[in-house]
Image: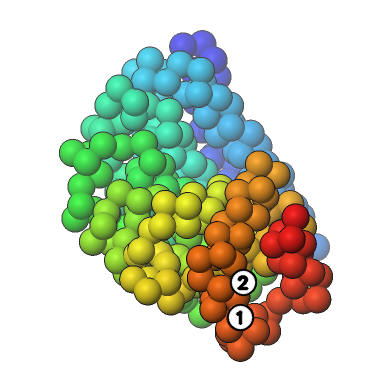
Amino acid sequence: QKSTEVLQMLMRESNERRDEREGRRGDEDVDDEEEEQLEGEAEREEIVMQSLVEAAGKLFEVYQSGYLPYFDSLLMPTVSEMLQPTAIASSRAAALCLFDDVIEHCSADGGSSRYIAGIFPALLQYMGDETTEVRQAAAYGIAMLGERCNDATFTEAMMQQAAQALVLAVDAPGAWEEEHASASDNAISALGKICKRSDAIGAVGWPRWLEALPLRADREEARHVHATLCEQVEKSNTQLLGANHERLPDVICVFGRLLGTDLIADEYLPRIGHLLKQVHSGLPQVLQQLPSHPKFALLSEENRAELEKALSS
């Protein structure tokens, strides 16, 4: 409890400094030098708040649902205020990250379930936020719903809403530009987790998921997603591959862009090689026709050499 009381105090002080700074920014007499000073203070404050959120996240990681009473009594009022649309973007992102921790670490025993009705609308809303860090935190929260919550808590109807919000986010103009791509990577990761759970969503979602691959901006999420690609191909997922394997060339082109990079874990390399050899022996026409496939043009000489190497090893 003492540690949470300290976190509560520090969060409140950080928010008070933020409000005071925003008030100074609204002053007409602020010159360029003062504005630059205020921006520097804001950046340092973001780092402070991020550290506080990470500390609270560690407490959830260690104590899981046992930490919820302290969260409710000491941190919830401040975090709920930070989640409001009127709060600045960094505060909204920080609040989302804490609720993400609740979902990630307190769902095994159902401890998170009473929070979901309140946080789910915010996750949907903030998938459309203009700030990358807010969208990324919202996408991660949806991913945790898909991975950790049971069907009674994260219902089919909620999955449908979440999938729609995720697709809208990755289809938005500029979603894959460098400064926004990490949020889009997380959205695609979340979409895959939902597709695993719902055949109805997977029928439409898996092809859209595949279109976005390979991911590059968020290396950790990229490696998870590319592992899922390998696993789903091993399972002969027809929603992903197509009833007549019509999307298998797309998959092979993705594999070509992953081999020889750190975007796929080493343990999956022999598995990809085995899958390519299965295609070579069972569906040779797919490889024969691959050079005429539009995605093949995206492969560099190095990518093509990696594919050849995997096939011949």
For disc 1, the neighbor class at 10 Å (few under 14, some 14 to 19, many from 20) is few
What is the number of callouts on the image? 2
Residue 228 image position (x, y, % from top left): 50, 51
Which residue is the site of mark 1? 288
**Can you see residue 158?**
yes
Residue 299 image position (x, y, % from top left): 71, 76
Residue type for callout 1 = Gln
For disc 2, the neighbor class at 10 Å (few under 14, some 14 to 19, many from 20) is many
Res 10 → quadrant: top right
Which quadrant of the rendered structure holds the C terminus? bottom right
Q: Residue at x 31, y 45 (%)?
A: 119
Q: Residue at x 26, y 57 (%)?
A: 199
Along the viewing direction, whichever of 72 and 248 lies nearer the viewer = 248
Where 187 falls versus 152 (above or below)?
below
Q: Nearer the viewer, mark 1 or mark 2?
A: 1
Tag 1 secondary structure: helix
Left or right of 181? Residue 306 is: right
Residue 177 image position (x, y, % from top left): 63, 73
**Can you see residue 88?**
no
Residue 286 image position (x, y, % from top left): 54, 76
Which residue is the site of mark 2? 253
Do tag 1 and tag 2 residues touch (Cβ < 8 Å)? no
Earlier sequence position, callout 1 versus callout 2: 2
Real-space Cα separation, disc 1 to disc 2, in angstroms: 13 Å
Residue type for callout 2 = Cys
Where 40 falls versus 8 (above or below)?
below
Tag 2 secondary structure: helix
